[in-house]
Image (spheres, grey):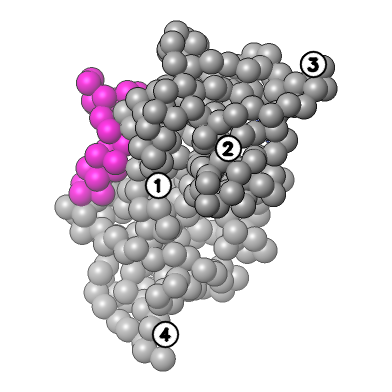
Amino acid sequence: METTREYKVVVIGSGPAGCTAALYLSRANLIPVVLEGLQPGGQLTITTDVENYPGFPEGVLGPKLMDLMRQQAERFGAVFRMEQVESVDFRQHPFTIKTDQRTYETAAVIIASGASAQQIGLESERFLQGFGVSYCATCDGFFFKNKEIVVVGGGDSAMEEATFLTKFASKVTVIHRRAELRASKIMQERALNNPKIEFRFNTTVEEVIGSKEGGVTALKLKDLATGEVSDFATQGLFVAIGHTPNTKPYVGQLELDERGYLVQPHHHSTVTNIQGVFGCGDVVDHIYRQAITAAGSGCQAALDCERWLTHERITERWGLASGEEERIDD
Ligand code: NAP
């Protein structure tokens, strides 16, 4: 497999954090390669209207916003590659990153690998994924035209998915485990006022019933107030219950918290527990998780990275101008 030292900085992830980091690095003449991962553009590519990203008074479609961010970074030289990180070695410098296509040796790394949709954790849910069980309304909503479907969750994601799905489905039932929704008032009101959306509170999904041939046909629901379990006929299940950080390749390499998020031990710095490795976006943030906060932290990571490279005089010692090529083929 090819080994390259072509890039002084590797950015892992291509959502708002990764794209913004790449933009700032490129404009500082530190042309990075951006390893896009399995979902180029990140979570915004599976959302619809983004109404809270400043600068778009009419709103903007998630995929369009990501396309614009990528174009802006590319304009200054950033290189985007559809590669998936398989393993890393941050124990020695230069750092090593192995992807499904090649090995990178690099002076600095910015991890912006984001987070992925959480699952309820049922065997039957896993079995029927892609056969009526979905985690992305934007991707799969179209397949549920005139069908009755369920959305699980009580946060903003669940309200957004339920509202979006009413464009296709004849009826959407939101199932939430508590009596109150967690979602912001405006998102709640939008869903509560939608005549196609019904709510079942204090209820959990115990089993998904169906087959790969016929799709989902019903759910076994438990009423937490009475303990009663009953079948609820439905033709689809959308799970919108939060996310887990994409940090698998960093286990044993970087400090992670109990939920698997990257730890940033220094106040006012995006550096991880290893100097030269920085984190930004949803992979470090389980509180704000917004496109704008991810973009902001991508900028911070790029500035921290640039300052570290300069301070450690690595830019000079690396011996290559940004983007200049040196390949070591095995
Ligand atoms: P969230 O706010 O963490 O909400 C997750 C929901 O799923 C909660 O209601 C939770 O129930 C429920 N849940 C968690 N695990 C569950 C399980 N195993 N079984 C059943 N229910 C379960 O996650 P989110 O809705 O994805 O939102 C994440 C962040 O993104 C938030 O800050 C949100 O504001 C933001 N966001 C914003 C927008 C927007 O502005 N357009 C859209 C989407 C998301 P409990 O309430 O009981 O904990």
Dividing the picture into quarters, in which one does residue 225 lie? top right
Residue at 66% across, 17% down:
201
- Residue position for label 4: 1
Q: Secondary structure at mark 2?
A: strand
Residue 54 on image: x %, y %: 29, 25
- Residue position for label 2: 217
Q: Amino acid at mark 4?
A: Met
- Give whichever of discs 4 and 2 has the lower sequence position: 4
Mark 3–mark 4 CB contact (< 8 Å): no
Q: Nearer the viewer, mark 4 or mark 2?
A: 2
- Residue position for label 1: 42
- Give whichever of discs 3 and 4 has the lower sequence position: 4
Q: Nearer the viewer, mark 3 or mark 4?
A: 3
Residue 117 on image: x %, y %: 54, 43
Q: Which residues are magenta?
A: 51-72
CA distance separating discs 4 and 2: 47 Å
- Give whichever of discs 4 and 1 has the lower sequence position: 4
Q: Amino acid at mark 3?
A: Ala
Q: Amino acid at mark 2?
A: Thr
Instruction: Give the quadrant of the N terminus.
Output: bottom left
- Give whichever of discs 3 and 1 has the lower sequence position: 1
CA distance separating discs 2 and 1: 31 Å
Q: Is residue 61 above or below residue 79?
A: above
- Residue position for label 3: 225
